[in-house]
Amino acid sequence: MSERRGDGPLAGASSGPLIDAHAHFYHADAGRADWEAVNAARFRAGERMGITYHVASVLGSYGFTSPTYFPSPADVTRGNDAMLAICAAEPDRVRMYVTVNPNYTDHALHEIERCVARGAIGVKLLASRRADDPLLDPIAFLAGERGLPMLHHIWQHRRREWPSQEISDGADLARLAARHPRTTFILAHIGGGGDYMHTFPAVVDCTNILPDLSGSGVDRGMLDSAVAALGAERLLWGCDLTMCTGLAKLRALEHIGLTRDDLSAIRWRNAARIFPRGAFPRAEPNAGQAPAA
Amino acid sequence: MTTDVNTTIGPYPFRHVPHPDPDALLRVLDREEIAEAWVGHLPSAFHRDPGSGNGELLAALAPHAKRLRPVPTIRPDWPHWERTLKDAVSAGAPAVRAYPPQWGLGPHDPAMRELAVAAGEQGLALLLTVRFEDLRQRHPMDVAGDLSAAAIRSLARAGDAVRLVVAAAGRDMIEEVHWGLTQVEQRRVFWDISWIWGPPEDHLAKLFRNVGASRFVFGSQWPLRLVQTPRANLDLLPDDLRDAELASTSAICRAAS
């Protein structure tokens, strides 16, 4: 097909490793017959692109036995178990966020302890409670104590309530982040819906918030604005549900005036910095950095 | 030869878009190794009368006629729209654009059907846009809504001369329209791939297998969206679809002539 390019890592190898900081996997209790095919497609595309690590979560039953964004404790546990199994089966390329529902504080804290003991390196918050709600404090505190980044589902600029989720935006997350300066927060998918131009000023002063670039949105100007507002050191590359847009953004990043160090920061170095030490052995500290002059 | 059928120039009313001009588009085409583009005038979608916008489009593209082909906008409930269609033919346009939701024209509007047939009889495709932005980020004043599947089906059924290029549709809409048409009607519709999801859901792969790659064309929706997206999507197709061929623009034009 003339519209396609040749072989080799599609995301380019010149800037070192590549860490997808926002991925998801499915499982047998997720209510879809093709769950294995979807997981396989993520690995297939990841290999083709050159993804070194998928940092992923399972969102309960994805609505099959409790709502995706309001998962029951039983579904949270079942999903985390599935994610642990995927990590065990793919130790060289998958890392795990432990998913929690903050409405069940004891269960959430227990899940974090249980899954971190088995290798989880971050915490995933959905939209079960607004980000600045005090119920998130014990979770954010524990995450900070353990050095676990918290990936929080975000709707860029919350102007009203939307069905099926208790949405938060950058301003909501900024209030939580201000209360927990020792905790690192990942603001989910600036391309995942809503107005990202509201998000950047909302979090600019909270240096413990790092937005990820994932989401199906590929607006021109979005990446440039993110870099201009926050700097390359505060952005994480990711795909979420659409790896095609993840690849497109990687390619676009090469044309917005970033240095090689900036590119490697977004591709993997920022992730290696904020996740627990040793989480990504195939992303070595000096890989992908520009050689000395 | 790759043609991006879904590009425009000019500003967008609801957010800033970086340098939406022909020179920037040409640089992008060079960088991305895209031979040519069909180019519309973005503000005309939101003007009551697109006539002035068509003039601006033709003037802006005239120095770049070999690679940037004009796609004027025609509002078929406007007096003498037939003259605008003749002008489009004279200008060498491969297609014309229309925006029924933005103009308040319903899914079965007879004027739209008349335009679709008339354009096809002149050898021009009718290019329709399902959406400009994700529903979740729209400006409070942007209330026109998406082009409906019903509207596309209605136009596809309007006559054998009709050739539609539908931009910015997703898998659900494409399947709803495709399987709601006869085989003859299906051949009148081409879809750009700018908004179709790739892996891991693999919507594009599923559509290629079930609807056929020959019903799809290369489109990016530049300058609103990253031009890299459609090629990234094609690059990530499963191995069994590596040799799948999109429809060429000449195939669209042949079909419409």
Image (cartoon, rainbow, N blue to C red):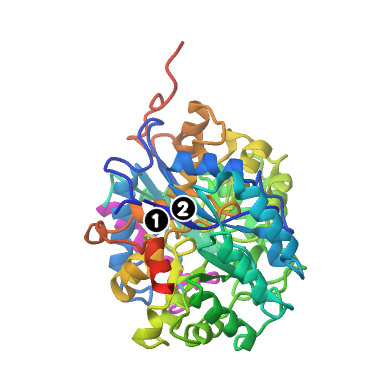
Q: Chain of mark 2?
A: B
Tally of numbered tags: 2
Q: Residue at x 68, y 82 (%)?
A: B105
Q: Which residue is nearer to you in this view: A58 or A267?
A: A267
Residue A224 % position (x, y) = 62, 40
> Is residue A240 shown left or right of residue B183?
right
> Is residue A16 shown left or right of residue A101?
left
Q: Residue at x 32, y 45 (%)?
A: A5
Residue tagged 2: B229
Q: Residue at x 36, y 55 (%)?
A: B234
Q: Which residue is nearer to you in this view: A128 or A252?
A: A252
Q: Quadrant of residue A230?
A: top right
Residue A154 % position (x, y) = 61, 58
**Which portion, as a residue range, is magenta?**
A64-89
Amino acid marked by disc 1: Asn
The vertical placement of B142 against A169, above or below, is below
The reply to whether callout 2 and callout 1 are in contact (CB within 8 Å) is yes
